[in-house]
Image (cartoon, rainbow, N blue to C red):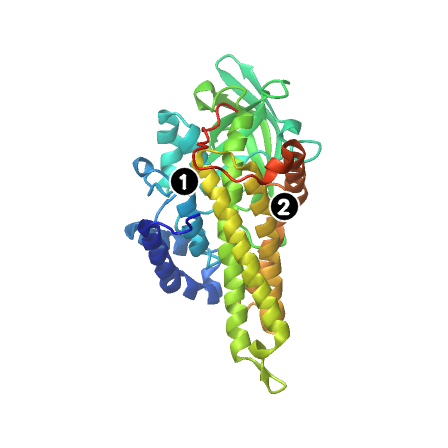
């Protein structure tokens, strides 16, 4: 197996690292650089985005004809990890959720007209987006088959009624992808729609408070009461909503992991630097075996996470859905991020618990990682189901002449 990356990817990584070091990291220590929800202030973000775009570090995930750099998933794994050395990093490069996943699925499944209307403004940085799927009980969450929001066909339009919640970015979004029920068919009962914030028939009920810092636009509860959507804004085809969710959520889960690895490494970086200088009872913290064991264990677990992410990215690049590999990476890296922040705080003591470092920010943010895009238990159930189906083949190695065909249909 060849773990070397292409020179082009290394060039992007180095340039991203330099940009983060010089332009973004210094901002974290200044509270004036934050908005009221713990993220980078929007006026400052706009200036940084202009600089990133001028340096060719913009929308690396999209094809060149759509304003990106055309990087593979393996290339994105390298670059996204580097971006998230800073808590502000990904959004500066237009690589943060939910826009990242929305752009990728629009590029893959949208018509040319839909790409021009709905994708291009996000790729240009002129619009933000949101993916409206999750619903309050008894509606759908990790199980899309439970979705209750209805889209009823009336003439050449669909009229939407229902409720969604924990919709990331909704308060700042202009473009929405909505998953709604168009029939009771268990496999083809869901349809994806595109709508704009200025359309009538829907509202944001509330921005839901959470324990951690938030993406721009927060996590909102939405109500639909007569939203009309034209047939031309059906996304992916009537009854193909499940395919849209599968196409979007698998890669989006993995790009979360790519970014979280960067944050986990940052926790180790802060802890290592402090342990090297902090003295106690006549000895540096770095010379204590207990500290060495904690940091050494994290270093190993981060590398395990990187290998899991890379294997999943490689599978996606081959045309696989990589369900097994993505679920493994999601569970491992989500738990790793939480533990890395916890160890970082423990090594730094009261300093780590304070706002003098970003460790407390990462710790509050990290707890959601085990919930978003599928709770740990859901992914573990997926892995168990695949193990039961595949038996010993669960661990098979792909053979060189065993070229896997791209999945067909949904």
Which disc is residue 127 wearing?
A: 1
Which disc is residue 366 wearing?
A: none
In the rendered image, the residue lying farthest to the right is: 138
Which disc is residue 371 wearing?
A: 2
Q: Quadrant of residue 113?
A: top left
- In terms of secondary structure, where does tag 1 sit? loop
Residue at point 53%, 24% (across, down):
410
Q: Residues within 10 Å of mark 2 (few under 14, many from 20)?
A: some
- State left or right for residue 240 relative to residue 6: right
- State left or right for residue 35 relative to residue 150: left
- Expressed as whole percent of the image width and height from the top left, the position of residue 322 reads 52, 37
Q: Quadrant of residue 168?
A: top right
Whether residue 177 is situated above or below residue 128 in the rendered picture = above
Looking at the picture, tell me which residue is in the foreground, 372 or 393: 393
- Expressed as whole percent of the image width and height from the top left, the position of residue 258 reads 49, 50
Looking at the picture, tell me which residue is in the foreground, 204 or 237: 237
- In terms of secondary structure, where does tag 2 sit? loop
- Expressed as whole percent of the image width and height from the top left, the position of residue 269 reads 50, 67
Q: CA distance from mark 2 to mark 1?
A: 27 Å
Whether residue 232 is situated above or below residue 118 in the rendered picture = above
In the rendered image, the residue lying farthest to the left is: 54
- State left or right for residue 277 relative to residue 144: left
Q: Quadrant of residue 81?
A: bottom left
Whether residue 318 is situated above or below residue 10 in the rendered picture = above
Looking at the picture, tell me which residue is in the foreground, 30 or 146: 146
Circle nearer the N terminus (2, 1)? 1
Which mark's residue is nearer the viewer, 2 or 1? 2
The answer to whether residue 360 is visible is no
Residue at point 55%, 51% (across, down):
214
In the rendered image, the residue lying farthest to the top is: 155
Q: Residues within 10 Å of mark 1 (few under 14, many from 20)?
A: some
């Amino acid at each position: 197996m060849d773990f070397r990356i292409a020179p082009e990817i290394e060039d992007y990584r180095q340039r991203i690292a330099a940009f983060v070091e010089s332009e973004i990291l210094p901002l974290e220590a200044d509270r004036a650089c934050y908005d009221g929800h713990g993220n980078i202030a929007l006026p400052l973000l706009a200036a940084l985005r202009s600089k990133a775009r001028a340096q060719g570090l913009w929308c690396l995930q999209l094809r060149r004809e759509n304003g990106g750099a055309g990087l593979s998933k393996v290339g994105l794994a390298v670059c996204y990890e580097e971006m998230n050395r800073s808590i502000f990093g990904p959004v500066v490069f237009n690589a943060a959720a939910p826009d990242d996943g929305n752009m990728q699925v629009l590029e893959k499944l949208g018509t040319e007209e839909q790409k021009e209307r709905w994708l291009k403004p996000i790729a240009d940085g002129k619009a933000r987006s949101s993916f409206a799927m999750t619903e309050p009980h008894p509606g759908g969450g990790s199980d899309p088959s439970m979705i209750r929001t209805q889209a009823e066909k009336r003439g050449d339009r669909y009229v939407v009624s229902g409720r969604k919640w924990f919709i990331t970015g909704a308060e700042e979004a202009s473009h929405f992808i909505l998953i709604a029920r168009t029939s009771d068919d268990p496999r083809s009962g869901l349809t994806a729609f595109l709508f704009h914030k200025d359309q009538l028939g829907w509202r944001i009920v509330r921005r839901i408070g959470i324990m951690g810092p938030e993406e721009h636009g927060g996590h909102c509860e939405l109500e639909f009461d007569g939203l009309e959507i034209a047939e031309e804004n059906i996304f992916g085809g009537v009854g193909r909503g499940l395919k849209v969710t599968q196409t979007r959520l698998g890669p989006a889960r993995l790009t979360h992991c790519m970014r979280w690895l960067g944050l986990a490494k940052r926790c180790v970086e802060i802890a290592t630097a402090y342990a090297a200088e902090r003295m106690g009872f006549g000895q540096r913290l770095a010379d204590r075996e207990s500290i060495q064991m904690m940091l050494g264990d994290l270093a190993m677990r981060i590398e395990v996470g990187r290998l899991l992410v890379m294997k999943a990215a490689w599978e996606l690049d081959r045309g696989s859905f990589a369900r097994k590999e993505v679920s493994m990476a999601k569970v491992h890296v989500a738990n790793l991020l939480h533990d890395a922040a916890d160890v970082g705080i423990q090594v730094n003591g009261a300093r780590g618990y304070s706002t003098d470092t970003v460790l407390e920010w990462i710790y509050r943010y990290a707890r959601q990682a085990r919930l978003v895009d599928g709770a740990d238990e859901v992914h573990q159930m997926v892995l168990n189901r695949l193990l039961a189906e595949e038996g010993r083949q669960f661990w098979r190695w792909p053979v060189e002449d065993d070229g896997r065909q791209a999945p067909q249909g949904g």
